[in-house]
Amino acid sequence: MTSTARPLLNRRLAEFGTTIFAEMSALALSTGSINLGQGFPDTDGPEEVREAAVRALRDGRGNQYPPGPGIPELRTAIAAHQERRYGLSYDPDTEVLVTAGATEAIAAALLALVEPGDEVVALEPYYDSYAACIAMAGGTRVPVTLRPHEGSFRLDLDELRAAVTDRTRLLLINTPHNPTGTVLTREELTVIAELAVERDLLVVTDEVYEHLVFDEAEHVPLATFPGMRERTVTIGSAGKTFSFTGWKVGWISSAPGLVAAVRSAKQFLTYVASGPFQYAVAEALRLPDSYFADFRADMLAKRDLLAGGLERAGFKVFRPAGTYFITTDIRPLGESDGFTFCRALPERCGVVAIPNAVFYDHREQGAPFVRFAFCKRDDVLHEAAGRLRRLASAGS
C-alpha cells in the first residue's frame, strides 16, 4: 500500500505537473484539430541525412553504446561548424560534448553548475524545462521579462543588471528566443557579456535556433564576446536545424573545465544516446551553406504565410525575428485569458495553440499571449489560416 502521509512528488518539482504540450496535443487528437502548438515539423529533413542514418545502422555504427562524449566524427563536425560559422575554435576532444538533445544539455549544465540556493537569472517567458531544471538543481530562478515594444519583445538591460545579486551564479540566455521569436542584438549581447565578466558569472546560452533568423536579424554567439568563451556553455541542436527532432542529438561547446563538469552530470542522465544518428548529424553539419540559406528562406515564407492568416483572423501578431514560433495578442479578439482561449480554440476553429502564460513565473504577464508554430507544410498552414478566419467572422 502506498503511504499518503506525504506527497509522492518531491517538493522541488511539486509545481510541475503534466506539460501543456501533452494536454494540447491530446486535445488536437481528440478533436481532429491542426496542431500548431508543439514545435516539431511535419516533414522530415534532407534525404541525404536520413540515408546517412540508415547507412550507419546497416554498417553497425552506433548500434551499441557510443563513446560518452559523443562519436569523434560528430564532435569534430561540431567544432568545424563553430569555426566556420562564427570563428570560434574548440578542441573536439576536450571542448565539445554530445547530449540527448538540447533539453538534456540544459539539464546537465544546470545540475552540474548550480548549487542549492544559487540564483539563476533567466529571460522570461522561457522554455518550460528551464524552470524545472533550475528546481532540480536546487537553484532559485530570477526572471527578467521580455516585454512588448514596437512590434517585438525586448530585453530591459537595466532590469537585467538589477536582477544580478551576490547570490547570482549563472545567466541562462536564449537567443533566438522561444517563445517570443526575439533575437538579441549585438548591443544587447555586449551588455550581457560585460555584466557576466564584471560580476564573474557563468552563462548557459541556448542557441538551438541559430540558423533560423529572419529579415535583418543576426545571430551572434555570446561566446564570441571578450571574456566570454571561458565562462559560456553554448548549447546547439540538430533537431531544429535539420528537422529531425525525434533523433535527440544536441551538444555543448565550452572551455575544458566546464565541459568536464557538465559531462559529470550528463553521464548519470542518459549516459549516451542516439548512436547511429550521431553519424548522420556529423554529415548534416557539413552540408553546404546553400542548405542553411534555403532552409531559412523556406521558414521565412511559412512565417509570413501564417502571420498573414493570423492578422486576417484578428490577432495582433508579433512577427518573430527568429525560431519557428509566432506570438500573438488575443485582446483585439475580445479575449484576455490565453488558457481559456486555447482550450476552446479546437472546438471553435479546429486549431491548437499554446498559451504563453505557461512560460512565465507570473502568469498574468503572459495571459493575453498565445503561441503558434509555423514549421508545418504550406497546405496545413493555409488550412489553419482558413479555419482561424472563423474568429474574425464571429466578431463581425
Image (cartoon, rainbow, N blue to C red):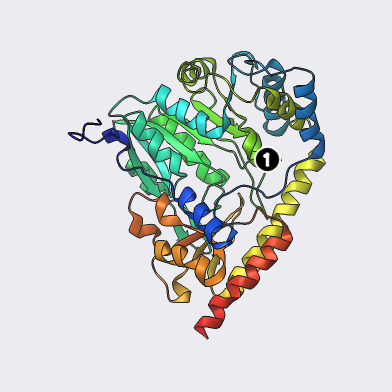
Q: Position of residue 58 (x, y in %)?
A: 79, 22
Picture layout, residue 331 above or below residue 272: below
Front-lying residue, 59 or 90:
59
Q: Mark 1 points at which residue?
A: 241
Q: Position of residue 230 (x, y in %)?
A: 51, 22
Residue most extreme to the bottom: 396
Please indicate, yes or no, whether residue 225 appears anywhere in the rendered image: no
Helix, strand or loop at label 1? It is: helix
Residue most extreme to the left: 5
Q: Quadrant of the N terminus?
A: top left
Q: Where is residue 77 in the image (x, y as percent from the top left)?
A: 72, 24
Q: What residue type is labelled 1?
A: Thr
Quick check: 30 left or right of 50? left
Q: Which residue is drawn at 79% across and 18% down?
A: 59
Disc tally is 1
Quadrant for residue 112, please give it: top left
Picture layout, residue 200 above or below residue 261: below
Q: Position of residue 284 (x, y in %)?
A: 75, 32
Q: Which residue is drawn at 62% across and 51% down?
A: 324
Please indicate, yes or no, whether residue 40 appears anywhere in the rendered image: yes
Q: Which residue is drawn at 41% across and 52% down?
A: 358
Picture layout, residue 280 above or below residue 300: above
Quick check: 309 left or right of 255? right
Q: Which residue is drawn at 63% across and 26% down?
A: 274
Q: How crowded is mark 1: few (under 14 residues within 10 Å), some or many (20 or more)?
A: many
Quick check: 165 left or right of 317? left
Front-lying residue, 91 or 347:
347
